[in-house]
Amino acid sequence: MTHPYIAEGSLPPGAAAPAVAPCRWLISLDYDGTLQNPDGPPIEPAFFEQMQAWRSYGVRWGINTGRTLNYLLQEILPCSPVLPDFICTCERYVYLADAHGKLQPATEHNAECHHRNLALREQLAPHLHCRLAELKRTHPHLQWQLATDDPLSVEAIDSPTMDAIIPHLQELVSSCCTIQRAGRYMRFADSRHTKGTALAYVMQAWQVPAEHVFIMGDGQNDLDAFCRFPAAWCTAPCTAHAEVLAWLAAHPGTRTAPESGVLPELRRWFTARVNTANAEKM
């Protein structure tokens, strides 16, 4: 079944699972390279079963991704029994489940992100495109293209190619502009909006402290969330980008997940944090 185009800022179709307890714990997961299953259904059925089993503990989960809302939901809607409790898209826009499970856009926050991104486009796009034209002339072997729907986004043929491209664009970074990078994808973005600030919005909305948050991601665009919330359970797949693995190795209390998939690490977190907190209350 093909779903109609889902515009950023619109009401996502479908619903999250009913909330059976007040939110006390948050799980924030990158999608590509982390939650996504490349060999079967996009998200394993066992994942949804585990999330349902933990709802009575006040655990809610979400996807924090660089994908657009449409690109994410077109993949997960056909095979997901429920939506996440929250979604953060394009490393900036936020959607939160209401009391009925319907994901509502964070209207004021998202509008601010949108307007700032448009302002950055107007300021930066001409300089970026000139720099890319020069790159194409001097390095014709590098295979890349501009994203069709975003003049500040570049898609390379693979991650090593993007590694080679980034140094040629670094001079465009400023105090108000940052590069958000994930594998073979990158975009220039307003530095006030990242995966970390999007997650901060969710945490504030549901009054969840960093110590009650699980964050897992494999790309450089996940590092801002790690740095912003060092008290969270920060982790990455063993296949994560080298910069992510190096950050985790340098910070006590963080770890690399040795197994593939998110469930083994989530279960370690639940035992160490959720069960321990419940035992201390008894």
Image: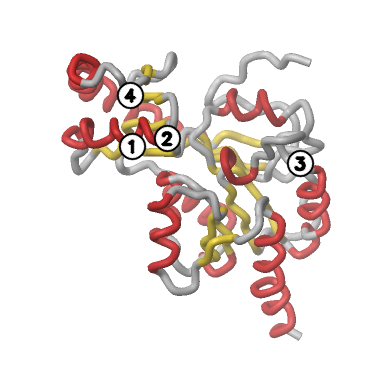
Q: Earlier in the sequence, mark 3 or mark 4?
A: 3
Real-space CA distance between mark 3 and mark 1, rounded to the nearest whole angstrom:
44 Å
> Closer to the N terminus: mark 4 or mark 1?
4
Q: State whether residue 271 is above or below residue 44.
A: below
Give the CA distance from mark 3 to mark 4: 36 Å
Residue at 59%, 66% in the rendered image: 212
Secondary structure, mark 2, is: helix
Tell me: residue 113, above or below residue 8: below
Q: Secondary structure at mark 1?
A: helix
Q: Quadrant of the C terminus?
A: bottom right
- The residue tagged with tag 3: helix, strand or loop? loop
The disc at residue 163 is 1
Give the label, 4 or 1, closer to the camera. Answer: 1
Marks 2 and 1 close (CB-CB < 8 Å): yes
| Residue at 67% over, 78% down | 277
Q: Cβ–Cβ below 8 Å for labels 3 and 1? A: no
Q: Counting residues from the N terminus, which is met first, the one under dot 2 or under dot 4?
A: 4
User: Is there a contact, CB below 8 Å, between mark 3 and mark 4?
Assistant: no
What residue did someone put label 2 on?
159
Mark 4 — residue? 152
What residue would you read off at disc 3?
A: 100
Q: Closer to the N terminus: mark 2 or mark 3?
A: 3
Q: Residues within 10 Å of mark 1 (few under 14, many from 20)?
A: some
* Quarter where residue 100 is shown: top right
Q: CA distance from mark 2 to mark 1?
A: 6 Å
